[in-house]
Image (cartoon, rainbow, N blue to C red):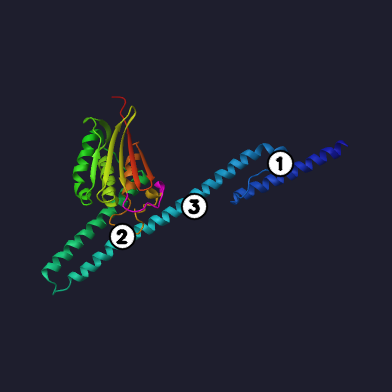
Amino acid sequence: MLYFYINQNMTKIKMDYMRLLQITNDLGQGHFESEINEDLGLFNSLKRELNQIKIGFEKAVQEETKSQNLKSELISNVSHDLKTPITCIKNYVYLLKDGNLEEEKRNEYFHNLELYTNRLTSLIEDLFEVSKVNSGNIQLNLMNLNIVDLLEQTLAESEDILNSKNLTIIKNDVEQDIQLYLDGDKTYRIFENLLTNIGKYALPNSRVYIDLLERKQDVCIEFKNISETQMNFTAEEIVERFVRGDKSRHETGSGIGLAIAKSFTEVQNGTFDIQIDGDLFKVTVCFKKNLSD
């Protein structure tokens, strides 16, 4: 009787072990369809761990698939952005070869050629910036700077693009001396890209709110505007996919300004948050205070 009892249990243990081996093989091959609920006898204590591994594997595969899709879309978007100015440059060079071209037309073509050349240069520089940040090959020139003065300077130098849509800037009153330990050029670029994005995609004749909030541990700058077109994307997509405000891709610009602003914020240990509520587009940039001062 003892022999039959031990033999029966050993047989069950062997069957449970084989089932456990089959489950792990299924997980290894990417089969995550169902939760493991069956009785595994002596190996029941491993069920919870196996289910956690299954969930982790499934999430990792989804993230990798998402990452590959984002990379593919990035290549597609950037290729389109590069192709447009290059095509226009080639066309204007061809037109300028006409020896009978009127002087007025020639000057117009030269002006347009310069615009598309500058656009192409800006796009290439943006791509280099994103590449350097993502590879970690970026140097910071940290210094004590007045974040209020820097914001005011960027606003003054962004007047043209903001005025082109008759946007009214409404700022809160803050102290004029808030010192933070940051890279001046990178921080200026963050503000410039955000204001440029507002100038391109905000509703004409609307108000733009810029609030600087000083808290105990950090300082936050909020940018709020109403979008001219429907924002049929998520806050995550607008940065990760480098999508445009209208997705029709007829607007100028590389579409990666927000990605650069986010990268420059995070490389300085700051936080960059985007919120979309209907037509309201809000970006909050926060930098830590130098509490040792």
Residue at 25% across, 56% down: 119
Name the residue beneath numbered marker 3: 65
Residue at 55% across, 43% down: 56
Measuring from the top left, give residue 45's x and y in whole percent.
67, 36
Q: What element carries label 3?
A: helix
Measuring from the top left, give residue 292's x and y in whole percent.
31, 24
- Of residue 196 and residue 57, the one placed in the foreground of this image is 196
Sooner in the amino-acid sequence: mark 3 or mark 2: 3
Foreground mark, 3 or 2? 2
Residues packed near mark 3 inside 10 Å, few (<14), some (14 to 19) or many (20 plus): few
> Identity of the amino acid at label 3?
Thr
- Whole-Å distance between the Cαs marked 1 and 2? 60 Å
Measuring from the top left, give residue 222's x and y in whole percent.
31, 39
> Identity of the amino acid at label 1?
Leu
Q: What element carries label 2?
A: loop
- Of residue 97 and residue 18, the one placed in the foreground of this image is 97
Sooner in the amino-acid sequence: mark 1 or mark 2: 1
Residue at 20% across, 62% down: 113
Name the residue beneath numbered marker 2: 250
Foreground mark, 1 or 2? 2
The boundaries of the magenta stretch are 227-236
